Amino acid sequence: MVANALDNIFSKGDAIAIDMPMTVTAVVIYLAIVLAGFVVVSIADSFAAQEIAVRLRVSNAKAIFTQDSIVRGGRRFPLYSRVIEAAPLKAIVIPATGEDVQVQLRNQDLSWKDFLAGVSHLPRPNCYFPVYQSIESVTNILFSSGTTGDPKAISWTHLSPIRCTADSWAHLDIQSGDVFCYPTNLGWVMGPVLLYSCFLTGATLALYHGSPLDHGFGKFVQDAGVTVLGTVPSLVKTWKSTGCMKGLDWTRIRMFASTGEASNVDDDLWLSSRVYYKPIIECCGGTELSSSYIIGNLLQPQAFGAFSSATMSTGFVILDEDGRPYPDDEACVGEIGLFPTYMGATDRLLNADHEKVYFEGMPIYKDMQLRRHGDILKRTIGGYLVVNGRADDTMNLGGIKTSSIEIERVCDGADESVLETAAVSAAPPNGGPEQLAIFVVVKEGMNISPDTLKKRFSRAIQSNLNPLFKVRWVKIVGMLPRTASNKLLRRVLREQWKQHVQIQSKL
């Protein structure tokens, strides 16, 4: 019915955005857009209006599906108002609760009920023949921040679902009979990965409507009989510190999958102990790869916070500072260089030069120009792999990638005393999510405290970028370190932040 309703309004190939929680309705909308030959534009429901607007503009979206609000803990948070502030596109609005939307719609917008009513006259509104397309056709536009101001617009083709499902099947052993739960959103890559990993393997998708940070989520995992639970290290840290999962029976879980940011070994040990020390499979990849490039698996012993192998069909080398590959059996630390033949990887960007972003400047290895990914990888003596951060200035805050430039742009305008800022992040010495620090140069004659700036920066970032981001530390400096060509040396500041974190961890 949804696919028929789409045909009633839009033209084949149109890009149609989804900005709402990952509910059953959102999943149906996603599948219907693909089924009917349209293109999904993925937007996270946590974004501010400005970030929504950028993604709608870059993708040339023709419409957007959203909710009137988001309900969390009995409270309503506006969503439709953010969407209409972002762009004048047609919006199809789903009620968060009940059958009727609880906001006043613009003239060009439709309620979910009216959208479906547009095909009620058809003799068979629930019958639809899928639109078949070439494997190179775009099925989904997702976004991943790099080191430039705008997020990279990444096109998933019809090969992308095959790749992410193949990895889930081969490395996580997702199969018919499994119940797979992963607290995520269709605006992030794990949303589509979860969806396809379930429906193309015969597994059951478990969706929880609410915050994954409290007992209610844990009880859902118990009652739904979840067998594979996806996590983000930030979630695990909260579960452990609050004790909110006490008294629950998670023994049906046969494994965990963890991705999004660096894991903390102590937190992983606690999580595994909840289910009689079942394995935690670490996954690390990227939106532009459609899946992971390094991962764990059930055929090898696993180490907490580490990866035991490359994903199926993936080849890579670790490069030294001069771009030369280390021997495959040598313990080392360096930037990853992926082999260019990579099933499912993107071959285009909507708003950037794909060759320049991923290949320009990368070394040649065995007559192949290596593909850039940007991770710094450590290979241990035992052959396990650990991600040691990024080679560029991308930050990973709470599992969400953003760029230093985006953070700095917002902070520069957060207070009139600010002359310029530099944003860096680092993980604690014992592992765990990256923490954000801002170095500030204030204008001459201005007097303001770091604590005041910390509050104003956090408020500005949460309002303009993402409400989940939080500034951990602010340091006022006389000047920022730069090269002779005036390039900001964030690595110098990052080392200062790491030293501060290490000192604080010992107190």
Image (cartoon, rainbow, N blue to C red):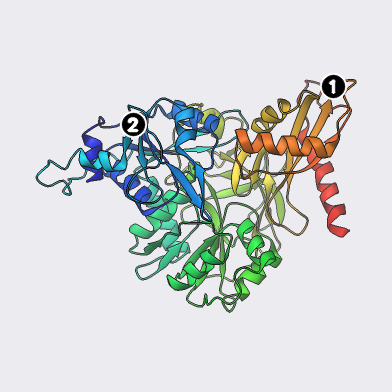
Q: Nearer the viewer, mark 2 or mark 1?
A: 2
12 relative position to 18: left or right:
left
Residue ID at (39%, 54%): 195
Residue ID at (74%, 35%): 456
Q: Toward which corner of the image does residue 62 lie, by quadrant?
A: top left
Query: Residue 3 at x, y = what percent?
Result: 24, 42
Say few, some or many: other residues with alpha carbon within 10 Å of mark 2 (under 14 / 14 to 19 / 20 or more): some
Query: Residue 304 at x, y = what percent?
Result: 65, 66
Q: Of marks 2 and 1, which one's residue comes earlier in the chain?
A: 2
Q: Toward which corner of the image does residue 225 lie, by quadrant?
A: bottom left
Q: Is residue 310 visible?
A: yes
Q: Pointer 1: what residue?
A: 443
Q: Pointer 2: what residue?
A: 109
Residue type, mark 2 in image = Asp
Query: Residue 483 at x, y = what percent?
Result: 81, 25
Say few, some or many: other residues with alpha carbon within 10 Å of mark 1 (under 14 / 14 to 19 / 20 or more): few
Residue ID at (81%, 31%): 440
Residue closest to the eye, 387 or 128: 128
Q: CA distance from mark 2 to mark 1?
A: 47 Å
> Which circle marks residue 122 in the picture?
none
In the image, residue 94 above or below residue 505: above
